[in-house]
């Protein structure tokens, strides 16, 4: 059973995936945790995350994000929901999260060389 005292310094991606795997298996929810349902759930939870920022100006959002404990807690809960569904999707797809993130970051580094994108952002040609 999962350790409630887990933190980012000691947890691994696999340990988070295992938490979700156990949670789903204990309830026999594998039939619901399909790639399509999980992709939808990630998007829904991302919208719930965004909802906390709806109508705030950038300075208001920055201040609440840095200083408002209740706001930070609520945003953290939605971030957790997104990440949990991401872990479950990785389980359902049987992909290695670390490998695909590292490969994508390698492509992003090539796409956005720091000497060209230092302090600015312009959308490069799609690819
Ligand atoms: Mg939620």
Image: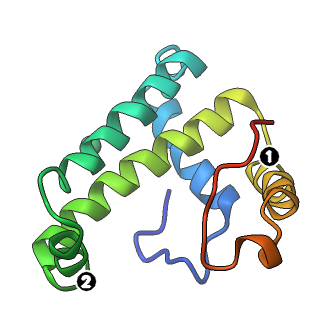
Asked whether the viewer can see residue 47, the reply is yes
Of the 4 image quadrants, the one containing the C terminus is top right
The residue that disc 1 covers is 96
Q: Position of residue 118 (x, y in %)?
A: 69, 79
Classify 10 Å Cα crowding around label 1: few (below 14), some (14-19), many (20 and above).
Answer: few
* Residue at position x 76%, y 40% in the image: 125
* Position of residue 124 in the picture relative to residue 55 (left or right): right
Q: Nearer the viewer, residue 36 or 92?
A: 36
* Residue at position x 43%, y 77% in the image: 5
* Residue at position x 34%, y 32% in the image: 44
CA distance for labels 2 and 1 = 32 Å
The residue that disc 2 covers is 66
Q: Given this view, does label 2 or label 1 mark the residue nearer the observer?
A: 2
* Position of residue 102 in the picture relative to residue 121 (left or right): right
Residue 125 is marked as none
Classify 10 Å Cα crowding around label 2: few (below 14), some (14-19), many (20 and above).
Answer: few
Regarding mark 2 in the picture, which secondary structure is present there?
helix
Q: Nearer the viewer, residue 57 or 21?
A: 57
Q: Ligand 1 near label 2 (Cβ, under 8 Å)?
A: no
Q: Position of residue 101 (x, y in %)?
A: 75, 54
Q: Position of residue 68 (x, y in %)?
A: 13, 79
Asked whether the viewer can see residue 28, the reply is no
* Position of residue 80 in the picture relative to residue 28 (left or right): left
Regarding mark 1 in the picture, which secondary structure is present there?
loop
Q: Is residue 120 above or below residue 92?
A: below
Q: Is residue 97 above or below residue 47?
A: below
N-term mark: 2 or 1: 2
Q: How is the image coloured?
A: rainbow
Q: Position of residue 109 (x, y in %)?
A: 82, 64
Q: Is residue 22 above or below residue 66?
A: above
Q: Quadrant of ligand 1?
A: top left
């Amino acid at each position: 059973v999962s350790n409630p005292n887990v933190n980012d310094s000691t947890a691994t991606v696999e340990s988070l995936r295992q938490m979700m795997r156990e949670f789903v298996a204990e309830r026999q929810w594998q039939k619901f945790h399909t790639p399509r349902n999980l992709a939808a759930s990630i998007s829904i939870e991302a919208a719930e995350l965004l909802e906390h920022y709806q109508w705030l100006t950038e300075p208001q959002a920055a201040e609440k994000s840095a200083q408002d404990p209740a706001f930070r807690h609520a945003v953290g809960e939605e971030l957790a929901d997104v990440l949990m569904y991401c872990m479950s999707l990785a389980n359902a797809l049987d992909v290695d999260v670390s490998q695909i993130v590292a490969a994508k970051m390698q492509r992003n580094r090539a796409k956005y060389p720091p000497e060209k994108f230092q302090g600015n952002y312009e959308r490069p040609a799609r690819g």
